[in-house]
Amino acid sequence: MPVSHENKFVFVHIPKAGGSSIEKAFGIYGIDNKGFNDEVDRNIMFGKDSQHYPYGKILTESDRDLSSYFSFAFVRNPWSKIVSEFFWRRCWDKRIKDLSFKQFARRVCEFDLRNPRACYHFLEQFTFIYNEDRLMVDFVGKFENLQQDLDLACELAGIAKRQLTHANKSNHEHYSQYYDDETQQIVAEKYSKDIEYFGYKFGE
């Protein structure tokens, strides 16, 4: 959860939506304090991970008034995001390693996202930046236009543009190749508000 006091911005890092690449571009990478190039807040914890924290809690739990800071986040097509989660987790999670994508998608369907102990990686993206139906951040970029939208975010924030490199990249075909009718519908139902709020369609 990087908050730059020098540049007066808050970046809400939604999992698997290009956030690690953005943090790396700003010299804020990993979950410790190494690599920071200015004064940052990294004390607020979400579970055991300080990278991913909803914007509302950032505001209420920070020891400074952040209301005047420029705030931004990036989102991703939910069908693409679940494929990325699958291949990323297969690299290190023994429980996932032997699952097919269909089996993995069915497990996603079983997650109770209302449970406060639910894995934040599978939370609906809008929950990080919305208060009920009200968008709280100043700018929402899309993973699909990552560099272009980050350039715009920097321009709006009044800070120097940053060149991105791809961090935590997983190698796979276009996400649509992994879906059948059942798994496509699983994601459509589980992440219906993300699809509605951010204007996503399957196959984009």
Image (cartoon, rainbow, N blue to C red):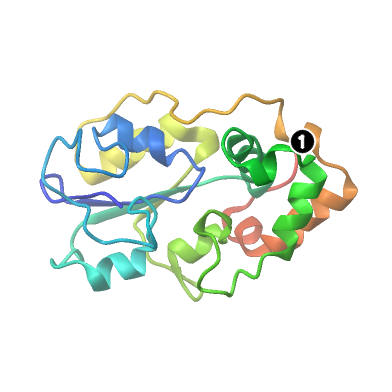
Quadrant location, the C terminus = top right
- Report if residue 194 is visible in the image: yes
Place of residue 2 in the rendered image (x, y in percent of width and height, measured from the top left)? 26, 49
User: Which residue appears at 30% of the width and 36% of the height?
Assistant: 29
Place of residue 93 in the rendered image (x, y in percent of width and height, measured from the top left)? 60, 42
Place of residue 104 in the rendered image (x, y in percent of width and height, measured from the top left)? 74, 48
- Residue 62 located left or right of residue 151: left
Residue that protrudes farthest toward the front in the picture: 94
Looking at the image, residue 114 lies above or below residue 98: below
User: Which residue appears at 41% of the width and 41% of the height?
Assistant: 19
Q: Which residue is mark 1?
A: 176
- Residue 129 located left or right of residue 76: left
User: Which residue appears at 45% of the width and 62% of the height?
Assistant: 128
Looking at the image, residue 42 lies above or below residue 145: below
Place of residue 186 in the rendered image (x, y in percent of width and height, measured from the top left)? 78, 57
User: Which residue appears at 20% of the width and 36% of the height?
Assistant: 34
Viewer-closest of 102 and 95? 95
- Report if residue 204 is visible in the image: no
Question: 10 Å neighbourhood of mark 1: few (<14), some, or many (≥20)?
Answer: some
* Res. 52 image quadrant: bottom left
**Type of amino acid at the residue the image marks with label 1:** Ser
